[in-house]
Image (tube, rainbow, N blue to C red):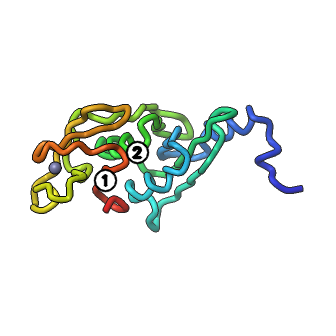
Amino acid sequence: MMGGMGMKKPAEAKKGLMVSPIENGTVIDHIPPGKAIKIAEILNLLQPGYVVIIGQNLRSTKYVLKDLIKVENRYLTGEEYNKIALIAPNATVNMIRNFEINEKRKVTVPDVLEEVAFCANANCISNKEHVPSRLYTVSRDPLVMVCHYCNFESKGEELKLKGAGGR
Ligand SMILES: [Zn+2]
């Protein structure tokens, strides 16, 4: 018989996802479907040495799908929370210690982003010279950020994040 996961009752399947089998590390949950790889890239998790489990198109509720990332022995910095929020505004981050959720946090897009994302205006001074990027949040839903230097408004999908995979 094939497909063990599909045969599970929903409650068990959900429990299996929510209760992390990792001893220490981070679980990033409620990522929009298809975005987990992007987030893993930006957090530099796709490198040798990290034990990472990426779940894609998992069932969150009967009709809603989500992605999920588990990484062992790795915790996130404040800047990394900001990056996640730009891609997955409703993500939750669980810090696991000794197999238990030590802390659970919702990510939020901060009012000011410094050196996290590039201005979407290719001619902006922050893209041409060694000037740190600085973006202000105008709206969180939909995500719109305005540049400190050129006043260009970047929409969520246009933002390129700094770091691996964010070129
Ligand atoms: Zn700009």
State the image coordinates of residue 25 (x, y, percent, origin top left): 48, 46
Q: Is residue 111 above or below residue 88?
A: above
Q: Is residue 148 above or below residue 138?
A: below
Quarter of the image with the N terminus is bottom right
State the image coordinates of residue 104 (x, y, percent, origin top left): 46, 31
Q: Of callouts 1 and 2, which one flags the residue occurring earlier in the amino acid sequence?
A: 2
Which residue is identified by label 2?
87
Looking at the picture, tell me which residue is in the foreground, 114 or 50: 114
State the image coordinates of residue 29 (x, y, percent, origin top left): 52, 40
- Residue at 31 percent across and 43 percent down: it is 155
Tags 1 and 2 touching, CB below 8 Å: yes
- Residue at 25 percent across and 49 percent down: it is 116
Looking at the picture, tell me which residue is in the foreground, 24 or 114: 114
Q: Amino acid at mark 1?
A: Leu
Residue 143 numbered mark, or none: none
Q: Residue at the bottom extreme?
A: 48
Disc 2 crowd, CA 10 A, few/some/many (<14, 14-19, 20+):
many
Is 108 on the left-hand or right-hand side of 17?
Answer: left
Looking at the picture, tell me which residue is in the foreground, 64 or 93: 64
- Residue at 10 percent across and 61 percent down: it is 129
Is 94 on the left-hand or right-hand side of 135?
Answer: right
Question: Disc 1 on helix, strand or loop?
Answer: strand
Question: Disc 2 on helix, strand or loop?
Answer: helix
- Number of numbered discs on residues: 2
Q: Amino acid at mark 2?
A: Ile
Is 97 on the left-hand or right-hand side of 149?
Answer: right
Work out how far the residue at label 1 is from the one at label 2, CA to CA, in angstroms: 9 Å
Which residue is identified by label 1?
161
- Residue at 52 percent across and 48 percent down: it is 69
Disc 1 crowd, CA 10 A, few/some/many (<14, 14-19, 20+):
some
State the image coordinates of residue 23 (x, y, percent, origin top left): 55, 45
